[in-house]
Image (cartoon, rainbow, N blue to C red):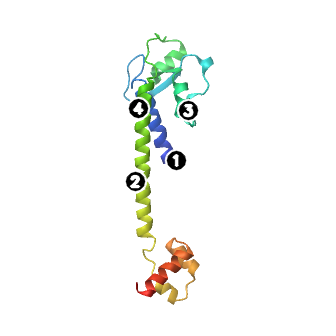
């Protein structure tokens, strides 16, 4: 999996969590920028996983358990809470498990749809481009080895031989 796919997955995961918390800061109501919204553990002693490790969690269930120990705050409010300038009222929105489950289902459907589309695009690209610019009959007539032909076409030696046989048999 490429790094771009990982970044996309992390962003979708955060969008899912933010939506499950109501989409905005629990104290001031800010919701303008996804990157400015953070998760604050209400009881640091009950924190099993810090936010920086959330992305490594393999299951949504573990993620939900950890998120249920938090409230969502904007970056400014989060810093003020840690500095003691702002106190939480206790009325901040908590994780809505039903919404989290619905968001998770949407992500999974989108992920499988995107995977199918990407797979078909890659397959089509391989099928159409692997023989572009490679005249296998001419190369063989010049004495080029099967390995060299296969490498230039990006296929196996067996695939090159089969292609040659098909082209020279006239079928």
Q: Secondary structure at mark 2?
A: helix
Mark 4 crowdedness (10 Å alpha carbons): few <14, some 14-19, many ≥20: few
Residue at 40% x, 53% y: name it: 117
Whichever of callouts 1 and 4 sits on the residue coming sooner in the sequence is: 1
| Quadrant where the image shows the C terminus | bottom left
Percent across and percent down for residue 109 are 41, 42
Give the labeled residue for mark 1: 3
For disc 3, the marked residue is 54
Give the spatial CA distance, label 1 vs label 4: 26 Å
List x then y, in percent, for residue 11: 45, 38
**Residue 132: % across, % down:** 42, 74
Residue that numbered label 2 is attached to: 117
Quick one: label 3, few (<14), some, or many (20+) residues within 10 Å? some
Marks 2/1: CA distance? Answer: 19 Å
Task: Report the number of discs.
Answer: 4
Q: Residue at x 43, y 47 (%)?
A: 112
Q: Which mark is residue 102?
A: 4
Residue closest to the far front:
171
Q: Secondary structure at mark 4?
A: helix
Q: CA distance from mark 4 to mark 2?
A: 23 Å
Q: Between tags 1 and 4, which lies in front?
A: 4
* Residue plotted at (47% across, 79% down): 163
Label 1's element? helix
- Front residue of 52/169: it is 169
What element does badge 3 sit on? Answer: helix
> In the rendered view, would you say 122 is above or below 8?
below
The nearer-to-camera label among 4 and 2 is 4
């Amino acid at each position: 999996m490429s790094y771009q796919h990982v970044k996309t997955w992390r962003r979708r995961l955060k969008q899912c969590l933010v939506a499950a918390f109501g989409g905005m800061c629990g104290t001031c109501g800010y919701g303008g920028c996804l990157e400015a919204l953070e998760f604050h553990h209400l009881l640091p002693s009950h924190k099993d996983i810090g936010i920086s490790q959330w992305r490594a969690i393999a299951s949504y269930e573990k993620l939900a358990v950890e998120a249920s120990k938090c409230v969502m705050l904007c970056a400014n409010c989060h810093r003020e809470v840690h500095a003691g300038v702002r106190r939480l009222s206790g009325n901040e929105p908590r994780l809505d498990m039903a919404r989290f489950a619905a968001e998770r289902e949407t992500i999974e459907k989108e992920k499988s749809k995107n995977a199918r589309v990407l797979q078909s695009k890659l397959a089509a690209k391989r099928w159409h481009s692997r023989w572009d610019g490679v005249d296998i009959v001419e190369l063989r007539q010049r004495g080029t080895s099967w390995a060299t032909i296969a490498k230039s076409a990006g296929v196996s030696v067996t695939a090159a031989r089969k292609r040659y046989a098909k082209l020279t048999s006239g079928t």
